[in-house]
Amino acid sequence: MRKTLSGVFIAIVAAAGGALLAVSATTVSGQAPAAYRAPRAADGHPDLNGIWQANTEANFDLEAHMARPAMALRAGPYGPVPAAAVLALGAVGSVPPGMGVVEGGPIPYKPAALAKKKENQDKWLERDPEIKCYLPGVPRATYMPQPFQILQSPSAIFFAYQYAGAVRNVYLKDPGPAPIDSWMGQSVAKWEGETLVIDAKGFNDSTWFDRAGNFHSEDLHVVERYTRSSADVIRYEATIEDPQTFTRPWKISLPLYRRIEKNAQLMDFKCVEFVEELLYGQYRKKPLTK
């Protein structure tokens, strides 16, 4: 039996060594696997059509973070938040840990802006625009925990988001400066080989990047890059610039996955109906007590 096992072990080692030699030979010869080439749309550009969704903790916090409670036990503008109510949420009321999607270290805030970010995080329950069903902005719309759809043709590109019915009409020809600052900004696209590059400006200062209080001013400028890396994955990158808030441009990157269910589609998420009491309940003649 010992002799048989030794022979098996030797055979395994020999096979592993052969595999390593094969890999080494491929590397030396430069015959690396060819880069993925996406299916083409009617105009010859990569086809990005489909329903996509991020699978990260970025909407909780763009930066690397440990698990933590989602809210502090404090009073807000809509009344006190009792400890019992917070504790009753249990694990549902917590932030899951995340490795982060920010490249090259922490977000480079200016000192005053960092202080505001920390204050936002402490007062997240009353300040986060997502809680009030406001439009998510860019890039947050891309990595919220709900799907979105890219509709692409030779003459137009359109993004439809399940959250709050948000949409983006992406121009293929620059119409000039945005006529007004808005929640979703103005987006102009061009192709750079296999990558769709979207230049987005014209934002108001009312959106956040996540639930951790990361924010921006009306000078926000976002350059997004969408690159198909496999049949059902888009590599998403966004470079963020805002000289009022940050000391330098910074970048996030994450994968977007195709929803491959046979009946995949965007559903209705009219969250305004869920926040009417939160926003306007104080104006009831007889406010609700429970």
Image (spheres, rainbow, N blue to C red):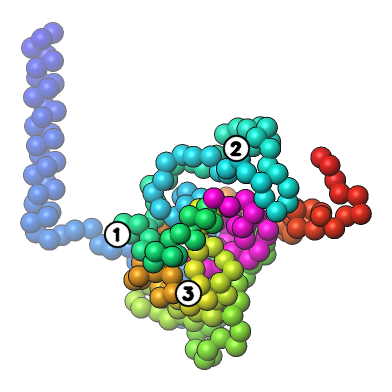
Q: Relative to 186, say whether 228 is above or below.
A: above
Given residues 264 and 271, the one toward you in this image is: 271
What span is colored magenta in the figure? 122-149
The amino acid on which the numbered mark 1 sits, given as a three-letter code, is Gly
Q: Name the residue under label 1.
A: 104
Instruction: Report helix, strand or loop for mark 1.
Output: loop
Q: In which quarter of the image is the N terminus?
A: top left
Could you tell me if residue 142 is visible in this image? no
Residue 4 percent location from the top left of the image? 11, 14
Residue 149 percent location from the top left of the image? 57, 64
Q: Is residue 279 magenta?
A: no
Given residues 289 and 152, the one toward you in this image is: 289
Q: Residue at x 14, y 41 (%)?
A: 19
Q: Using the rendered view, name the quadrant where residue 178 is placed.
A: bottom right
The amino acid on which the numbered mark 3 sits, given as a three-letter code, is Leu
What kind of secondary structure does the magenta stretch mostly adopt?
Answer: loop
Q: Mark 2 points at which residue?
A: 92
Q: Does the magenta stretch include residue 138?
A: yes
Around disc 1, counting alpha carbons within 10 Å, would you say few (fewer than 14), some (14 to 19), or many (20 or more)?
few
Around disc 2, counting alpha carbons within 10 Å, would you say few (fewer than 14), some (14 to 19), or many (20 or more)?
few
Q: Is residue 138 left or right of residue 250?
A: right
The amino acid on which the numbered mark 2 sits, given as a three-letter code, is Val
Q: Name the residue under label 3.
A: 220
